[in-house]
Every structure is written in C-alpha cells, then in structure tokens.
Amino acid sequence: MKENQRFVSYLRVSTGRQQLGLEAQREAVRQFTRQSNGELLAEFVEAESGKKNERKILNEALAFCRKYRATLLLAKLDRLSRKVHFISGLMEIKGLDFLSIEHPTRDRFWLHLQAAFAEEEGRRISERTKAALAALKNGPRGHLLGATGRALAKRHKAEATKKAFTYESIVSELRSEGIKTVKATMEALNERGVLSPGGTGWHLRSTWKLINRLKTAARPKGSQLE
C-alpha cells in the first residue's frame, strides 16, 4: 500500500431507504483511509441495483478516478457488482484501479475469485428470497400476505412507533449535547445503560430505526410532548 494514496469512494445501496447500509460503508472507508494514511478526494453515492451495468453515478466516479489518478475504494466488491464479467471488464480499463476494503488486494487472480464469490452469493440470495416468498404465499398461512398481513404490519408499525417515542426525551437530551450521528447515539445509549425495546443493548440498525421513527412518524396519542 502506497502512503498518501488518493482514493475516491463509491457507496451503493439498492434503494434510497437503506441509509444504514450507507453509513456502514462510509465508516469502513473512513477507517481504511485513516489507517492507510490515504487521502479521500471525493465520495460518490448511488441508490441503484447492482444488477444494472449502466449506472450514472458509478460512471462519474470512474471518470473522476481516471482524471485524478485515484483508486476507486469500495467497502465490499459486491458494491461494484455481483457479475464476474462486469468486474473483469473494469479490470481491463487502462489507468483504472479499484480496491475492496473487505479484501484489499490488487492481484488479478484474487479479484476474479472475489467476483465469482460475489456472483454466487447473489444467486443464492435470490433463490432463498424466491423460495421464502413462495412458501409464504402457498403455505397454510399464505393469507398473511394479503389483507390480514397488511393489517398486522400496520399494527406492528404502530406498536414500534409508540415504543420509539418513549425514548424521545433521552434522544433529545443527547442531541442537545451534540450527539447526533447514529453511531454516537448508539454508543451513548449503551454507555448510559439505556436498554432497547427488546431489553438488550443497542446496535447500529436498532439505533437508526429509533432515530428514523422519531423523525418521520406521527406522534402517538399519549406520548411525550415536544
């Protein structure tokens, strides 16, 4: 690894709602660039399926890398693509270099292997998802995917929102102290011994859900006043 190497990060999620996934990727990039004494020139964020080869933001990131002779930095290789032929094609572009933080190697053989693993993992995830949906739809409780399922989902959402607002005062207190990020809030809640609704400690996903509900959900009747 070269010292003072220049990087350009590319963060990708499948939908614009997966903010937690973005934060995890961003944190991995921060830690890697700090540990490697690298310089992060720019960040490109895209909400798009990895199955699509034509991605506007990715193309912009690649062009930026070539212009400034920087390395494209990825939290995981599958953020680039789960297709072997797509990754292989990028490897053939002159003047383009990319690096996966999960397995930081530039060896072409290992990059091909990583791409193959990513493609196989994507295929298995797709198969498991299809099988699970088919089982729910055709099984004895398949009706839950219909009106009953929607009613249950609505009730569960209302219950989760009501529980979230019981934490409103502590979250407001943390914000007044300058603690605003998901990670910092998680650490503060755990340090103060505040248990999650499930009676356990907080992790990134549960903390993000709490903050998101407090920001976007309507205040339940009987909850704390602002």
Image: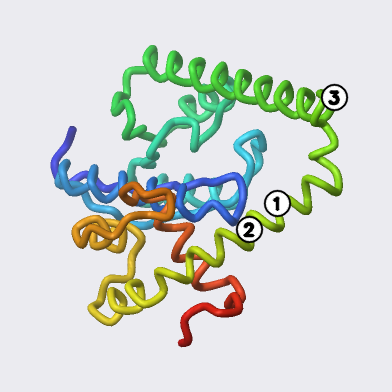
Residue 14 image offset from top left, x and y in percent = 60, 45
Q: Nearer the viewer, residue 121 or 130?
A: 130
Asked if residue 146 lies left or right of residue 78, the reply is right
CA distance separating discs 3 and 2? 25 Å
Q: Residue under circle 3?
A: 138
Q: Callout 1 environment at 10 Å: few (<14), some (14 to 19), or many (20+)?
A: some
Instruction: Identify which amino acid the numbered label 1 is placed on.
Output: Ala
Asked if labels 1 and 2 touch by Cβ distance under 8 angstroms, the answer is yes
Instruction: Identify which amino acid the numbered label 2 is placed on.
Output: Lys
Asked if labels 2 and 3 touch by Cβ distance under 8 angstroms, the answer is no
Q: Residue under circle 1?
A: 153
Q: For numbered disc 3, what is the local secondary structure?
A: helix
Name the residue: 79% across, 25% down: 134
Task: Looking at the image, tell me whether mark 3 or mark 2 is earlier in sequence order.
Answer: 3
Q: Is residue 198 above or below residue 192?
A: above
Q: Residue under circle 2?
A: 157
Asked if residue 206 lies left or right of residue 86, the reply is left
